[in-house]
Image (cartoon, rainbow, N blue to C red):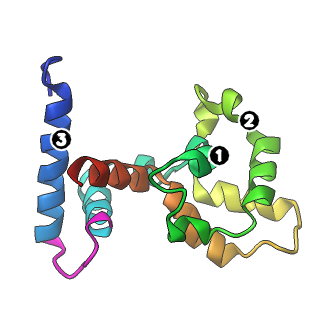
Amino acid sequence: MRSEEYFFEGLLVMSCYIGALSRLRYPQIKEDRKSYKKFVSKYSGLNDIFENIDLLFFYQWRKNATVKNDKIYNDLKDYPKLLAIFKGEFGDEDNIKGSTVRYQKRERLVELIKTKNVAWFDEVKFTKNIELFSNNQILSLLSGTLIE
């Protein structure tokens, strides 16, 4: 990891190692991504960071070939309405790219939507689905892409 020449190879080896450890630690979890996320969340000591929602990923996910056709992402209802609320509060993609507002707590997003008093908002479903845009989910996607 310290070598510029082999940095990406180091990341790959580290991701594979974490993936193997997570499968050993959580054999009852059948999906690699889920065991990977649980392992990183529990043992990294950085759970607050990993639970943050990446608004840039939320804004751009439909352009991402890895997830745009994934049915679990397409389960997110009212995406255009949510996107409009978030852009109204935090700005567009260009505004959030280098900004600290890019990463938000899910509770903050729920409160923001609630302040809009919209009848279409399903808090339970939103809370479940917004996790797909967490840093932990992105990490598991990247590790799955590296490994597959």
> At numbered mark 3, what does the secondary structure look like: helix, strand or loop?
helix
Give the image location of residue 130, x and y in percent.
58, 62
Q: Residue furthest bottom?
A: 28
Work out whether mark 3 precedes mark 2 in sequence or the reverse, and give the earlier one: 3
Is 143 displayed left or right of 97 in the figure? left
| Residue drawn at (44%, 52%) of the image | 66
Residue under label 3: 12
- Say which of 48 and 1 sits in front: 1
| Residue drawn at (28%, 50%) of the image | 143
Q: Is residue 47 visible?
A: no
| Residue drawn at (32%, 61%) of the image | 37
| Residue drawn at (18%, 58%) of the image | 19
**Residue type pointed to by label 3:** Leu
- In this rendering, the answer to whether 131 lies above or below 48 is below
Give the image location of residue 98, x and y in percent.
58, 25
* Residue extent of the magenta highlight: 25-33
> At numbered mark 1, what does the secondary structure look like: helix, strand or loop?
helix
Is 106 displayed left or right of 147 in the figure? right
Give the image location of residue 105, x and y in percent.
58, 52
Q: Residues within 10 Å of mark 3 (few under 14, many from 20)?
A: some
Quarter assignment of residue 124: bottom right
Residue under label 1: 59
Residue 46's tag is none
Give the quarter of the figure containing the N terminus. top left
Give the image location of residue 50, x and y in percent.
41, 50
Q: Is residue 100 visible?
A: yes
- In this rendering, the answer to whether 130 lies above or below 119 is above
Quarter assignment of residue 101: top right
Residue under label 2: 92
- In this rendering, the answer to whether 143 lies above or below 6 is below
Is 39 displayed left or right of 82 in the figure? left
